[in-house]
């Protein structure tokens, strides 16, 4: 028996290797290195929203710390404006959206609606947001629309859902192999 072979039960806990039954040997079952929770933990579309918020305020990440860049302050939004715009994008930049199954027309409609809302917020709150030029409105619109569209398009075709579903199926096959081993030679008898 190879030293790198690990036997697990249906809960993923390590167990002792099965006894060989009536001379039959069973192929080792490799331990699943990823499960559904691990994959979902790695999908973090919300992280870009925090980056966008800081960038909208004219900040750069330097040595792990966000620092205000004076040369960008004439074009930057206020912390209130950046916060509101980031919060507008946050609901579509979530793990739930990453595993959704939206159609193309739904994605485009939702992205445009969110970008229009960002425009309305900038117009209604232009003083509080630090809006001084019309090009800032277009800039915010493009950032919001692009991020929202790309985030909503990411799960198109159910690629991430299929990946997660495939991982679940792999775990189920491990359980079914364990069941065969526990029955020993009875599986091969008539």
Image: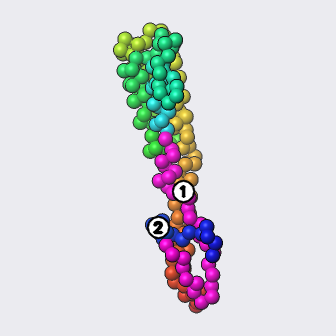
Q: Residue at x 64, y 72 (%)?
A: 2
Relative depth, front residue between 138 and 36: 36
Horizontal placement of 129 versus 41: left or right? left
How many numbered circles are shown? 2
Quadrant into which the C terminus falls: bottom right
Q: Position of residue 75 (x, y in %)?
A: 49, 13
| Residue 155, image quadrant | top right
Q: Position of residue 37 (x, y in %)?
A: 47, 53
Q: Residue at x 55, y 83 (%)?
A: 19
Secondary structure found at label 1: loop
Looking at the image, is mark 1 or mark 2 nearer the viewer? 2
Quadrant into which the N terminus falls: bottom right
Q: Residue at x 48, y 10 (%)?
A: 74
Mark 2 neighbour class, 10 Å CA radius: few under 14, some 14 to 19, many 20 or more: few
Task: State the mark number for residue 166.
Answer: none
Does residue 38 show up?
A: yes
Relative depth, front residue between 96 and 171: 171
Relative depth, front residue between 53 and 88: 53
Mark 1 neighbour class, 10 Å CA radius: few under 14, some 14 to 19, many 20 or more: few
Q: Position of residue 165 (x, y in %)?
A: 53, 57
Over which residues does the magenta segment extend?
Answer: 15-44
Q: Residue at x 49, y 49 (%)?
A: 40
Give yes or no for residue 42 being in the magenta stretch.
yes
54 up-or-down from 129: above or below: below
Task: State the mark number for residue 13.
Answer: 2
Residue assigned mark 1:
34
Give yes or no for residue 137 being in the magenta stretch.
no
Relative depth, front residue between 66 and 138: 66
32 up-or-down from 91: above or below: below
87 up-or-down from 5: above or below: above
């Amino acid at each position: 028996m190879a030293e790198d072979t690990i036997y697990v039960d249906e809960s993923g806990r390590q167990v002792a290797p099965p006894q060989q039954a009536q001379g039959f040997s069973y192929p080792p079952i490799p331990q699943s290195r990823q499960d559904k929770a691990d994959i979902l933990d790695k999908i973090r579309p919300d992280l870009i929203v925090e980056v966008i918020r800081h960038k909208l305020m004219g900040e750069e990440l330097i040595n792990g710390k966000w620092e205000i860049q004076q040369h960008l302050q004439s074009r930057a939004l206020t912390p209130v404006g950046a916060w509101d715009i980031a919060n507008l994008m946050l609901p579509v930049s979530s793990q739930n959206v990453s595993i959704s199954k939206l159609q193309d027309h739904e994605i485009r409609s939702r992205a445009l609606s969110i970008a229009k809302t960002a425009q309305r917020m900038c117009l209604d709150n232009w003083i509080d947001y630090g809006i001084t030029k019309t090009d800032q409105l277009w800039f915010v619109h493009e950032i919001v629309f692009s991020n929202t569209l790309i985030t909503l398009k990411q799960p198109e075709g159910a690629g991430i859902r299929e990946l997660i579903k495939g991982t679940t199926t792999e775990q189920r096959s491990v359980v079914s192999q364990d069941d065969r081993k526990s029955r020993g030679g009875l599986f091969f008898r008539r």
